Image: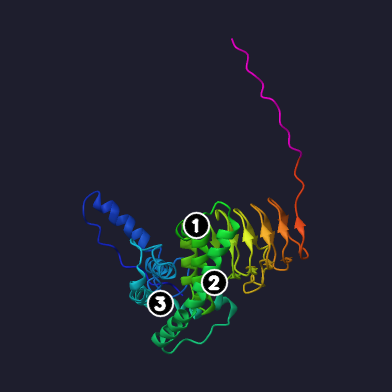
Amino acid sequence: MKKPPAKSASRCTAGAPEAEICKTANALAGLFNLKDTDAPDGLLTHSPAPKNVVDALRVLLDAMFPGKISATPVDGSDLGVFLVRRLSEAWRLLRREIRRALPYRWIGEAARVEGARPPKIDNLDRETDRILKAFLDTLPGVRQLLIADVQAAYDGDPAALTFAEVLLSYPGLLAIAAHRLAHELYKLNVPIIPRIMSEWIHTKTGTDIHPGARIGRAFFIDHATGVVIGETTEIGDHVKLYQGVTLGARSFALGADGMPVKHIKRHPTVRDGVIVYAHATILGGETVIGARSIVGSNVFLMESVPADSIVSSTHPDLQIREKKRSKKT
């Protein structure tokens, strides 16, 4: 079926440079799919607005850590009013975007290809309000998890001298907080919005955590930069990662259409009390790192290890030579 043509920007009768601008605009307009479908050339007319999603995430982070995002600290006597205002603002910002995202449950390309589209929602407003209420009900639990994350960061970093510096400055904590919020929306089957949240915080912290990843209590990412945690990763309690760690997938299984198979376990499981040092790479959905194990720096691992293991790799011999001194002329 042919897509409807886009309307011309103008008749392009003006003189230069307006005529050249108009010609280019008309050429670009013909490259957009104006049908209400999920397509690589789609116009995204009815999609969620990333700016509003990011604004909502910032408001929610402010509710989790009052004063971290706000311009001024929050006084204890004003905390209740502050939280009501912040949560009301988050509801307002998210309501429109969740409503616009929900149709992707059945118009999304993966749902179309798999032929397993869920039934359309008769009342988008009612479903949106149900999701928002369920999401708000999770926030006290998210706050409790984040308190344990702050404690883990302080306990795990000898450079941390105050809880305040952890709360106000640590990029790993910011990444974890955003993930815990996005993960709750992911569990409520909200399309697109959790990914917008996680990818925005990725740009801010250098930490890439897919909102589908399941992460336990007291999680700490030291230095944070370059960490990648895939969608089906499972992480237990009291786990510590250092910079550059990848918890990723091996080569993807392909379906009959030649495309990667979705909705299968592709990423590793990391049990309680594990420490993974800088730039280690752990791959595969069947890979399990046993409890209390230590994985050393630069390890490349695609197999399971039992509990209480130490995993290290052999590196080339280190050589230190004296620099040759240049002869004076």
| Residue 132, image quadrant | bottom left
Could you tell whether 131 is left or right of 314 in the image? Answer: left
| Residue 7: percent from left, percent from top | 31, 67
Asked if disc 1 and disc 3 are in contact, CB closer than 8 Å, the reply is: no
Mark 3: few/some/many CA within 10 Å (<14, 14-19, 20+): many
Task: Measure the alpha-carbon separation of dots 1 and 2.
Answer: 19 Å
Asked if disc 1 and disc 2 are in contact, CB closer than 8 Å, the reply is: no
Asked if residue 54 is positioned above or below residue 140 in the image, the reply reads: above
| Residue 55: percent from left, percent from top | 38, 67
Residue 100, label in figure: 3
Residue 320: say if magenta: yes
Q: Quick one: SS at disc 2? A: helix
Residue at 53 percent of width and 85 percent of height = 118
For marks 1 and 3, the one nearer the N-term is 3
Residue 145, label in figure: 2
| Residue 234, image quadrant | bottom right
